[in-house]
């Protein structure tokens, strides 16, 4: 959320964000009003007993007011407990509902990630942001509505005792909201910046931890430490501004509240002195005067909670409103994957793909081209993460909005250069692809990728893969990712730069498995190294987002076009490197 957006304390979107919370809020308000009336009744009974004592009444005269006061106190206890329990239930409901919605939204985005929120920001908003919204719904909103109702309830009782004092007290009440509004103009800017600074600091910390090895190697850790200190200092300053704002608003509200109560008390005392109020009536008004201001005073104290919660709520609302791919409910039928007259743009200003036509049948189909030609975008369209600006993506002759995501993903596997291996055992990683996978199936898949002996000698299927696959090599990580997908037995396999940054042996193992898979499934290979696609049944050469050439390797080489030129250049570079390596070995 930017600082330009207005934060409304009763934003309709935020109020509807947690559906069903209205009845909890209404129950809390009603019980709070009942509790206030009970307090007034107890106060009236005490004032009555004081008046009786001043008149020298007999002991029997105290029985009824004392009994009523005791009854009021007894009833006040369960009422207060009920209010707290309802607030706790509301908070728990809000947390559960919003976390479920947030998780479901992230899942519904599928293989597409959120574009406007970093991983650190997403984590902070979905955890602490929801905690702040919990307070917004369970504390602020009930207090807001109670604060609006309470002064009028008090006025409707006190006006029968003395309309002058009651009117003055009621007239002074709006001064507190006015002070809140005055502070809110400054607070809106503060809280809009607060979450931005908070998430920026989280992003920087996460980047620093993930890139700690590189920072050490480049000897840049000290410089990055200074950068983190600057972010932390910025967050400290904005936090101090929040605290100063809270202190200032509290001071202003105290002056208004006590000033208004003081005016009412002065009038009550004047009434008693002038004789138009009895001592009992004056004492009651004096004791009740502060009750006119306490609800709004409590609302003002919860104001910073509301501002923080509203800021977090806007971010959560933006996440929940993020556009997601549209899927249908049908089943995917047999047939090819096809990009038909597809044009795609990320921002509407530049077409990344232009009128592209591709068909992916059983066998190997390769998408190649220079960096920035649109290969990764084509992968996003095939996996359903992206939808074309124009044209159609067809699977078995149907578009994505005709069949369910579950149906399509049950047929699709993706192995990329950054396929995630979970911080779990080898067996648990296989269970991600097939829940009832047996050890025999695991070892069969591991054998195909030349990892069976390694796993067997290092703890077997119970071997735990550490975070970011830190206890295996890059090549082993890629081969393990392939093995996991092999047990899934899919109809469509997408290999997105799956052989990047790995050793020659691992690359050879992966290419052998790609060749074997192509006998029974449609295999899509995206590779910057053209030697890996020589055996492909169909090659699409992309240039500036358009299919410039297509055909088999021999056909494209025979044309002598851009593909042939790029292949020959890579071949010469590889041969030159081999000659250099041999020469170095001879020396």
Image (tube, grey):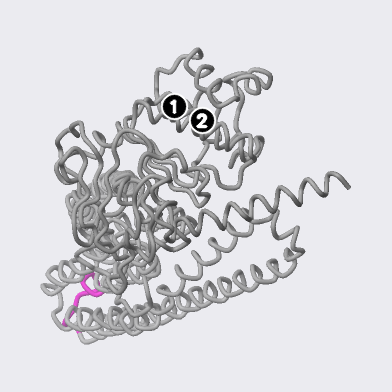
- How many badges with numbers are in the image? 2
Please tell me which residue lies in front, 174 or 281.
174
User: Is the residue 365 above or below the residue 451 in the image?
Assistant: below
Please tell me which residue lies in front, 360 or 474.
360
Q: Are marks 1 and 2 in contact (CB under 8 Å)?
A: yes
Q: CA distance from mark 1 to mark 2?
A: 6 Å
User: Is the residue 476 above or below the residue 62 in the image?
Assistant: above
Residue 13 lies in the magenta stretch:
no
Residue drawn at x 36%, y 42% is 365
Would you say 35 lies left or right of 467 here?
left
Residue drawn at x 50%, y 58% is 566
Q: Secondary structure at mark 1?
A: helix
**What residue would you read off at disc 1?**
516
Q: Quadrant of residue 135?
A: bottom left
Please tell me which residue lies in front, 12 or 358.
358
**What residue would you read off at disc 2?**
512
User: Is the residue 277 above or below the residue 463 in the image?
Assistant: below
Which residue ends up furthest to the front in the rendered image? 558
**Which residues, given as a range, are shown in magenta?**
275-282
Would you say 30 lies left or right of 413 here?
left
Residue 279 lies in the magenta stretch:
yes
Residue drawn at x 56%, y 20% is 447
């Amino acid at each position: 959320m930017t600082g330009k957006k207005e934060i409304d304390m009763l934003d309709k979107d935020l109020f509807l964000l947690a559906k069903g919370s209205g009845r909890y809020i209404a129950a809390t308000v009603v019980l709070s009003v009942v509790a206030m009336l009970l307090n007034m009744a107890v106060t009236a009974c005490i004032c009555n007993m004081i008046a009786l004592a001043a008149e020298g009444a007999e002991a029997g005269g105290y029985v009824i007011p004392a009994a009523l006061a005791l009854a009021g106190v007894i009833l006040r206890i369960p009422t207060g407990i009920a209010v707290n329990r309802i607030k706790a239930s509301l908070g728990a409901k809000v947390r559960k509902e919003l976390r479920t919605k947030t998780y479901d939204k992230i899942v519904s985005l599928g293989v597409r990630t959120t574009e406007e929120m970093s991983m650190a920001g997403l984590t902070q908003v979905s955890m602490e942001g929801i905690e702040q919204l919990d307070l917004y719904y369970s504390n602020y909103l009930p207090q807001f509505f109670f604060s609006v109702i309470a002064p009028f309830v008090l006025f409707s009782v006190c006006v029968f005792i003395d309309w002058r004092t009651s009117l003055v007290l009621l007239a002074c009440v709006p001064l507190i909201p006015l002070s809140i509004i005055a502070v809110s103009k400054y607070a809106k800017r503060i809280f809009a910046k607060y979450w931005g600074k908070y998430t920026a600091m989280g992003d920087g910390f996460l980047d620093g931890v993930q890139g700690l090895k590189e920072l050490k190697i480049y000897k840049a850790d000290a410089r990055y430490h200074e950068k983190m200190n600057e972010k932390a200092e910025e967050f400290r300053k904005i936090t101090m501004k929040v605290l100063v704002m809270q202190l200032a608003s509290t001071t202003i509200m105290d002056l208004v509240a006590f000033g208004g109560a003081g005016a009412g008390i002065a009038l009550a005392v004047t009434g008693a002195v002038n004789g138009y109020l009895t001592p009992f009536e004056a004492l009651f008004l004096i004791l009740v005067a502060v009750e006119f201001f306490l609800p709004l005073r409590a609302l003002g104290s919860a104001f910073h909670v509301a501002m923080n919660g509203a800021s977090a709520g806007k971010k959560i609302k933006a996440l929940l409103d993020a556009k997601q791919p549209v899927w249908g409910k049908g089943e995917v039928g047999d047939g090819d994957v096809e990009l038909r007259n597809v044009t795609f743009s990320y921002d509407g200003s530049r077409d990344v793909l232009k009128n592209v036509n591709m068909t992916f049948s059983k066998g190997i189909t390769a998408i190649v081209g220079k960096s920035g030609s649109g290969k990764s975008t084509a992968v996003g369209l095939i996996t359903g993460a992206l939808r074309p600006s124009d044209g159609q993506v067809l699977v078995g002759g149907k578009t994505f909005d005709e069949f369910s995501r579950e149906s399509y993903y049950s047929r699709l596997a993706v192995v990329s250069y950054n396929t995630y291996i979970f911080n779990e055992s080898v067996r648990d990683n296989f269970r991600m692809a097939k829940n009832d996978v047996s050890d025999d199936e695991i070892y069969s898949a591991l054998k195909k990728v030349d990892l069976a002996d390694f796993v067997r000698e290092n703890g077997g299927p119970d071997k735990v893969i550490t975070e970011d696959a830190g206890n295996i090599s890059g090549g082993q990580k890629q081969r393990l990712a392939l093995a996991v997908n092999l047990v899934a037995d899919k109809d469509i396999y997408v290999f997105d730069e799956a052989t990047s940054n790995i050793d020659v042996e691992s690359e050879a193992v992966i290419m052998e498995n790609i060749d074997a898979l192509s006998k029974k499934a449609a295999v899509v290979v995206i590779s910057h190294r053209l030697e890996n696609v020589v055996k492909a049944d169909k090659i699409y050469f992309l240039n500036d987002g358009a299919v410039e050439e297509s055909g088999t390797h021999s056909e494209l080489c025979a044309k002598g076009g851009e593909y042939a030129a790029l292949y020959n250049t890579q071949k010469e570079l590889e041969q030159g490197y081999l000659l250099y390596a041999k020469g170095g070995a001879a020396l």
